[in-house]
Amino acid sequence: MPQRRAKRLITVNFVAALDTGVYGIHMRVGNAEQSGLFRVPFDETQLTQISSDYEDNQFNPIGGKTPPAEWGTRLFHALFHGRLKELYETAVGQGCAIDLDLVFDPLDEEGYDTLRRCPWEWLADPVTGNFLCLEKTGGSVTRRLMLKRGAPTPPGFPTPPRILVVGASPEQLTALDLKGAVNGIQAAQNTTKVQLDIQKAANGSFEAMLTALKDAQAADKPFNVVHFIGHGGVVKGQGVLVFEGEGNRPHYVGAQECAHELASFPELSLVYLDACKTGAQEAKPLDSVASALVRRGFPNVLCMKNNIKDDHAIRLSAAFYAALAQGLPLEEAVTAARRAVVRIQTFNLCWSVPILFSRRIAPRFQSERAWHAFHRLWTFTGLALAYVTFTIYGKTQGWGLDLPLTEKGSYAAAIYGLLLGIPLFLWHLWLTIFYAQNHRNQPWYARLPPLFALEWNYAYKDARLFQAVSFLVVLVLPALGQIHFVNKMKNGSTFIHKLDDRKLTQPSPIGVRAQHFVWRPASYVFNPDNYFVFGASSFGEKDQVQFFPFYQPVAIVLLEVLVFWFYLRMLRAVFFTPRKNQTARGS
């Protein structure tokens, strides 16, 4: 077996629908990440045309139809552009095969409905003109549905994987070559690389399939793969599988019922639906057989988006299991199956009919929706901090701002800038550090949360300018304000103390610093009858703030030191943390 090349996984998360046909996306290639926009390059008419024109999986260049490669190139340009394209070119330039994971949120039904209808399996590199999922280097395209809960996805198939084959060809429907299909699958057992344990159900009924699964589970030898050979379709917007019923009549089993019954067998790592339209676009977004199974918790579902001829389906499944038997991962086995049928017939498109659906459990706080909420929280604290800093600074400068936070005079108002600003600033800095550390492999402007939770394409200069202005408003100006308030406190503080039983000494005029900070005995400093006055130029004026006892102003100073330390950590996390080297992921 030839040595396999290193592979590069490109993960594209479709975060949210921002407008009709416009989606925020987050792309990750190795350690590098980038955010951007995806605009669907097809209108509704073109999406319908793509589905109807190629339902027979044939392309006739004389018929006036748009070549699939052209559709795929348009989709490629919409997905990879600006800095997003730079990530792709970096991966390709390293000589790696490309595994493309497209992550959708099935609960966003309107957005998911549009995205799932795009011909992702036709994605074509405009430089080479090749389809990504037909690359000789073993590339793949996988559609992953983001789930909010569920068990972790099994790491792979056990050795040897146990496969249950269920063949159904009821009367009144087109007869299928079940024997040829089963023989093609069982031929994979002849390999010596990985032994496959392939069993056949007693008959093609739904009950026989469930019985075989239950018996294997009871014997502690559960099946890992269910391979269904039969007919599929769409009835009233819901995907169905056609089993053999009583008297060999068709028995239609809906997607939800099938998913519900199979959910009792968590050991299943793959459901192979060798049946027409099991991933059909005609079904409602969440009601195709494949979508229902993945939502129910099955790790992987291999289905057919259109009708497929019997001989094409037989060759696909035989090549798929032969690749599994050679020890290839699931995604590469699907690619090998595609390549095995690509030359069956000139202009044949049956290689693009299989769709690999997988699930992805949203990690805690790492889902894009959670980050979007984080952006709003960061914006709120940043604007609150900027408001407090600006209004109180204005009062200390004598500006006539008629605002509720600025009732005190020049010197005394500054203490409110400390009392209100310090906790807000510490919280805001911690949020910024947390975000920057979780985005350390991105450039500096992507390590800052976007103000107002805006979705930016960081390929453009205006996004970087916006982030720079955000940094100035909610991080630089509040820091300068804190320096100003501390300086005001230093220049406007007077230590008042008792001398034996005499009256309080009169404070020195503001501006004579030497008299403000005279060392006193410890008995004076920690005597609760002694205190600091912060404010007016002479003791007794109402525009003052009085501290009891000594440790209160000291606590403010220590908190400001903590603010300074957090600020340095924030600067390091945003600007001075080096990005990790991008290394190829071995397959």
Image (cartoon, rainbow, N blue to C red):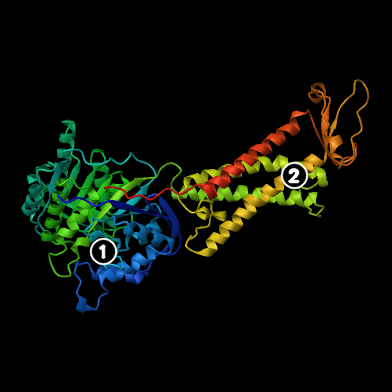
Q: In this view, does 205 lie to the left or right of 398?
A: left
Residue that numbered label 1 is attached to: 131
Q: Compare residues 248 and 511 and report the one nearer the observer.
A: 511
Mark 2: which secondary structure?
helix
Q: Is residue 311 left or right of residue 564?
A: left
Q: Are marks 2 and 1 in contact (CB under 8 Å)?
A: no
Q: In this view, does 413 lie to the left or right of 60?
A: right
Mark 1: which secondary structure?
loop
Q: Which residue is depicted at the point 67% across and 36% down?
A: 559
**Residue 159, how many percent across, how many down?**
17, 38
> Which kind of residue does numbered mark 2 sit on?
Phe
Q: Which residue is depicted at the point 68% across and 39% down?
A: 560
Question: Callout 2 environment at 10 Å: few (<14), some (14 to 19), or many (20+)?
Answer: many
Q: Residue 571 carries which label?
A: none
Q: In which quarter of the image is residue 84?
A: bottom left
Residue that numbered label 2 is attached to: 485
Q: In this view, does 352 lie to the left or right of 475?
A: left
**Residue 347 visible in the current orientation:** yes
**Residue 252 visible in the current orientation:** no
Number of the front mark, 2 or 1: 2
Q: Quadrant of residue 140?
A: bottom left
